[in-house]
Amino acid sequence: MELNCKTVERELTVSLSGELDHHGAREAIRTIERAVECNLPRRMVLDLSRVSFMDSSGIAVLLRGYRRVTETGGTFRVVGVPDQARRVLDAAGVGKLIDIS
Amino acid sequence: MKTKAENEVVFQFPSHSVNEGFARTAVACFTAQMDPTLAEVGDIKTAVSEAVTNAILHAYPDVIGEVSVRVRRLPGNVAEITVRDWGVGIQDVEQARKPLYTTGNEERSGMGFTIMESFTDTLRIRSRVGKGTTVVMKKKITGK
């Protein structure tokens, strides 16, 4: 699991790559929280296009990022969702809460 | 009567979270002989990951214990996956199966059993407090 954070004009893009499971979730949550605290983004984009596997631990990561950004008035969006991760998000109904494109 | 398996594999490992990836990949490798689609491989890996993570996180909250995984190939191209632990057990299985219910920490969403149910055909959970939990999932592989 690797994370890459980039901020341009208060838009924070976090790109995840590798396998997002319980083993990697804690570090992902910590990194995202730090990035949000440091940058106070108006918009956050979570890019999953290089995630090769994701289970329900990934949902916890998404929800945490969503809450952190929206509680300070920012917007949150998930992009580049691979098929396997999309099936997990669909099964959990996450699309009702979070903007997934 | 127990259905005779055409082939099977059993493996056991200590409940270190780093073994989650090994467990789901090992099960996916075994089921490759059943000629699954890419989506079916993803479903199996996801369901196994949820079951194994539950065992690692909930069955053994403060200690390292053993987790066993058995995969059987049953007639009709059905994969039967059993994940077993000898941990604390689940007090109320019906409650544990409900979406969003979790006794876990921030890395869990409470959707583990919901996802196991969605990604397999049948899910059975047997648990005894203080003795452990056994999760049995079956999935018919329709193939390519």
Image (spheres, coloured by chain):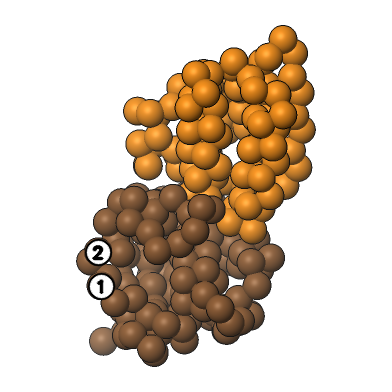
Residue A43, picture quadrant:
top right
The kind of secondary structure element at disc 1 is: loop
Identify the residue at horizontal 61%, vertical 50% (top origin): A25
CB atoms of marks 1 and 2 within 8 Å: yes
- The residue labelled by disc 1 is B92
Seen at 49% across and 43% down, the residue is A59
Q: Disc 2 on helix, strand or loop?
A: helix
Residue at image position (39%, 89%) is: B131
> Quick one: B21 or B72, which is closer to the camera?
B21
**Mark 2 Cα-neighbour bin, 10 Å: few <14, some 14–19, many ≥20:** few
Q: Which quarter of the rendered picture does the N terminus of chain B lie within?
A: bottom left
Task: Judge from the rendering whether residue B58 lies leftward or rightward of residue B135; answer left or right.
Answer: right
Three-letter residue code for mark 1: Asp
Nearest the viewer among A89 and B89 is B89
Please tell me which residue lies in front, B100 or A54.
B100
Visible residue check, residue B78: no
What's the CA distance linking mark 1 and mark 2?
5 Å
* Rendered view: A35 above or below B18: above
Spot occupied by residue B50 in the image (x, y as percentages of width and height): 48, 60
Rendered brown, the chain in question is B
Per the rendering, the colour in which chain A appears is orange
Across and down, in percent, residue A64 comes to 52, 39
Q: Chain of mark 1?
A: B
